[in-house]
Image (tube, rainbow, N blue to C red):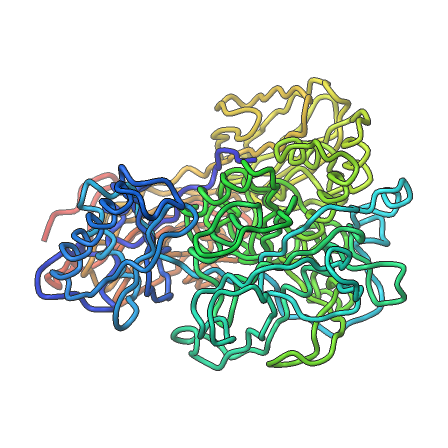
């Protein structure tokens, strides 16, 4: 389920625009500017801003192309001829060599760069060159995604997500009712499988726990098996050495990530072995897409299509299509044409897709495939039911599930199946891991329990029932984590026709302003700053009125979710779960170079915000407060509004005379917060910088409100 997000598009520095030119491009050229990105949005999917990935392949979609899977018709051959001409015309002026590699299951053409991989800036320019041709419908880099587990501590012997009421998923009553996922296939689209007695009952197909899968990694080096794609999804180990997967990439041991994820979703139980999976009688099917250095868009998309029963050229069809696809992987990117097409295909084939939200403590809208339409995006909750410190957030999230937080205590991780090898596979074992990777298979297991009890459920129905039956967070899940924590027993009961008598409501505050949200009937009382959240339940079909109240000095901007207006009142009919976001803003006063503000002050630690735009090439930025009484503190930050935890300069002196300077300031907007400790008055603020010519702009002896003369 996708909702309009209150999070703004990420700001970028104003980079000098560089046109495409003859004579070649550097493999580490500067990225294109934001205006160019915005102009081509939706057709050209650029690498994420600030990306350090390199790109050796791209995916292009042509207009008037043959259908996916049609490689021999006249239309397909004509399209291939047009593509070859397009590649020559676009790449030769840039000093590059491109070749068409193959067509993938979503209909896109995979293009390979001959020679060195391109940096983000060079990739930008190649994408623009290809997009100049009107035959191109869309184009994207073949980005790599990675497993989303975090480091962990040694295995201990219990599973709090199953056993505990506070942070758990309430699965034992569902088991007692007879739900076990029998006959349901869960595809683990991940690093592949290793032998484990908790995942393999030693019976021949079709009675084995683990069904035949596929190795969809096309690059033999990344696959580490020497032969690329084949029908053996064995995890060969994803260990690597320092810098093996790109500049500054660290060395790490093999994670056995797919084995761990599989155990959470569906490990055997009542077998005198280690752990119990959520849907312990479901089948497991491994689709190996992540290798030594993660997985490519083309391979992951083909894995999604194949797992759901779709056709992938050159690969035998899946004889046992999966009902549930678990993707505990992701990376920073918009949802591209390739991912959305693969997801749409899988849903049309009847599969429900469960996706980890990501572990960057950032808005999920910036991470794929969790930001795609039609998936169930899962945040990670802690043992006490709050948001795990690393978990992504925002209205893109549908639901939360236990993902662990071993930073609090080693036993707070998620216990599951692993291999004990540090590089190549050795013996089976158990260990704790943390991450939204561990949260997603909890939800995948619950979805399998639901399908096992009612095989007629559609992907949309499963998503709605999971969200509507979620349990309100026992402690605030800051910044938005979906409707609540997945409740297995309630979801299974609803799947079999049970009545949902009450619906969860969660409210989260966003923005740089302060305020609170209250409700009638009572139950919601959130305040007073961004990140605050609260949740409760209301009777199904009840009418709930929410009231937003801005704190002094701030304004309420708008609602997101069931209401989308700017009125401080939001009326919600609880026919389904409601995830509401209230946006509060801080008024920001724009400053001019060298112009001193009038005197100002605040009481009760209420902040005042200012901003100044600094051009490229400026020098000697000076931001100073002076005068008045009380104690004012100065905070300065580039690109985003500062707060008491996020700043680039904070003198933190007694009194009202403080200054921040930078000899070579970054171009763009610099934000300033002045806050009392607790009160101040009569203070003035000045921000000044030297122009590109090196001249200073001085404004001495100016009256309040006068303009500063140009140098």
- Asked if 46 appears above or below 694 in the picture, the reply is above
- Asked if 417 appears above or below 206 in the picture, the reply is below
Residue 678 in picture, x, y percent from top left: 55, 49
Q: Quadrant of residue 597?
A: top left
- Looking at this view, is 218 or 449 the one in front? 218
Please count the marks in the image. Answer: 0
Would you say residue 275 is visible in this rendering? yes
Would you say residue 682 is visible in this rendering? no
Side of 248 relative to 207 (left or right): left
Q: What residue appears at the point 78 percent right and 52 percent down from the top-left corner? A: 278
- Looking at this view, is 597 or 483 the one in front? 483
Q: What residue appears at the point 58 percent right and 56 percent down from the top-left corner? A: 189
Q: What residue appears at the point 50 percent right and 40 percent down from the top-left corner? A: 345
Side of 536 relative to 306 (left or right): right
Side of 259 relative to 190 (left or right): right
Residue 80 in picture, x, y percent from top left: 25, 50
* Quadrant occupied by the N terminus: top right
- Looking at this view, is 79 or 632 the one in front? 79
Residue 96 in picture, x, y percent from top left: 19, 65
- Asked if 211 appears above or below 176 in the picture, the reply is below
Residue 208 in picture, x, y percent from top left: 76, 59
């Amino acid at each position: 389920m996708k909702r309009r997000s209150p999070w703004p598009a990420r700001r970028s520095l104003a980079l000098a625009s560089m046109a495409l030119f003859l004579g070649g491009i550097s493999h580490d050229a500067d990225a294109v500017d934001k205006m160019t990105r915005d102009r081509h949005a939706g057709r050209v999917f650029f690498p994420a801003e600030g990306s350090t990935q390199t790109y050796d392949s791209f995916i292009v979609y042509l207009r008037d192309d043959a259908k996916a899977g049609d490689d021999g018709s006249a239309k397909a051959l004509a399209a291939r001829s047009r593509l070859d001409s397009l590649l020559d015309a676009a790449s030769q002026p840039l000093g590059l060599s491109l070749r068409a590699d193959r067509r993938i299951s979503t209909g896109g053409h995979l293009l390979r760069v001959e020679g060195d991989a391109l940096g983000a800036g060079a990739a930008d320019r190649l994408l623009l060159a290809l997009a100049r041709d009107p035959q191109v419908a869309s184009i994207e880099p073949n980005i790599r995604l990675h497993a989303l587990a975090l480091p962990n501590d040694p295995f201990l012997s219990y599973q709090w997500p199953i056993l505990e009421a506070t942070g758990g998923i309430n699965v034992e009553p569902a088991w007692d009712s007879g739900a076990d996922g029998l006959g349901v296939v869960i595809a683990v689209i991940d690093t592949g499988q290793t032998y484990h007695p908790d995942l393999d009952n030693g019976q021949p197909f079709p009675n084995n726990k683990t069904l035949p899968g596929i190795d969809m990694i096309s690059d033999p080096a990344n696959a580490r098996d020497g032969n690329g794609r084949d029908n053996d999804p064995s995890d060969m180990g994803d260990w690597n050495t320092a810098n093996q997967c790109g500049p500054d990439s660290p060395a790490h041991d093999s994670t056995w990530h797919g084995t761990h994820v599989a155990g959470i979703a569906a490990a055997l139980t009542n077998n005198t072995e280690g752990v119990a999976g959520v849907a312990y009688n479901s089948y497991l099917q491994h689709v190996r897409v992540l290798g030594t250095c993660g997985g490519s868009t083309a391979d992951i998309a083909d894995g999604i299509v194949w797992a759901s029963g779709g056709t992938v050229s050159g690969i035998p069809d899946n004889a046992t299509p999966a009902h549930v696809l678990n993707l505990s992987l992701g990376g920073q990117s918009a949802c591209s044409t390739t991912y959305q097409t693969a997801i749409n295909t899988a849903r049309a084939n009847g599969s429900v897709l469960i996706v980890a939200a990501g572990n960057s403590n950032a808005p999920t809208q910036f991470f794929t495939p969790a930001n795609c339409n039609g998936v169930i995006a899962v945040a990670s909750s802690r043992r006490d039911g709050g948001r795990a410190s690393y978990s992504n957030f925002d209205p893109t999230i549908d639901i939360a599930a236990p993902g662990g937080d071993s930073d609090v205590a080693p036993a707070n991780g998620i216990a599951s199946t692993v291999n004990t090898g540090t590089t190549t596979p050795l013996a089976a074992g158990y260990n704790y891991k943390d991450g939204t990777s561990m949260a997603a298979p909890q939800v995948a297991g619950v979805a399998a329990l639901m399908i096992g009890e009612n095989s007629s459920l559609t992907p949309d129905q499963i998503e709605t029932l999971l969200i509507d039956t979620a349990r309100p967070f026992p402690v605030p899940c800051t910044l938005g984590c979906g409707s609540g924590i997945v409740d297995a027993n309630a979801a299974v009961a609803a799947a079999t026709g049970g009545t949902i008598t009450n619906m969860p409501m969660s409210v989260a505050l966003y923005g740089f302003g302060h305020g609170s949200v209250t409700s009638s009937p009572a139950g919601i009382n959130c305040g007073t700053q961004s990140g605050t959240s609260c949740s409760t339940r209301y009777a199904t079909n009840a009418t709930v009125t929410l009231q937003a109240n801005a704190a002094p000095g701030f304004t309420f901007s708008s609602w997101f979710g069931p209401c989308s207006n700017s009125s401080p009142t939001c009326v919600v009919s609880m026919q389904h779960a409601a995830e509401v976001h209230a946006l509060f803003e801080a008024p920001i006063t724009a400053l001019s170079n060298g112009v001193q503000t009038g005197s100002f002050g605040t009481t009760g630690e209420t902040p005042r915000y200012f901003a100044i735009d600094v051009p490229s090439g400026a020098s000697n930025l000076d931001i100073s407060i002076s005068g008045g009484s009380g104690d004012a503190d100065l905070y300065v930050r580039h690109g985003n509004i500062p707060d008491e935890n996020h700043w680039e300069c904070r003198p933190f002196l007694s009194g009202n005379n403080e200054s921040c300077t930078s000899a070579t300031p970054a171009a763009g907007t610099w934000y300033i917060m002045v806050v009392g400790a607790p009160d101040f008055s009569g203070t003035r603020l000045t921000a000044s910088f030297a122009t590109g010519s090196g001249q200073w702009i001085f404004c001495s002896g100016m009256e309040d409100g006068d303009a500063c003369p140009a140098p």
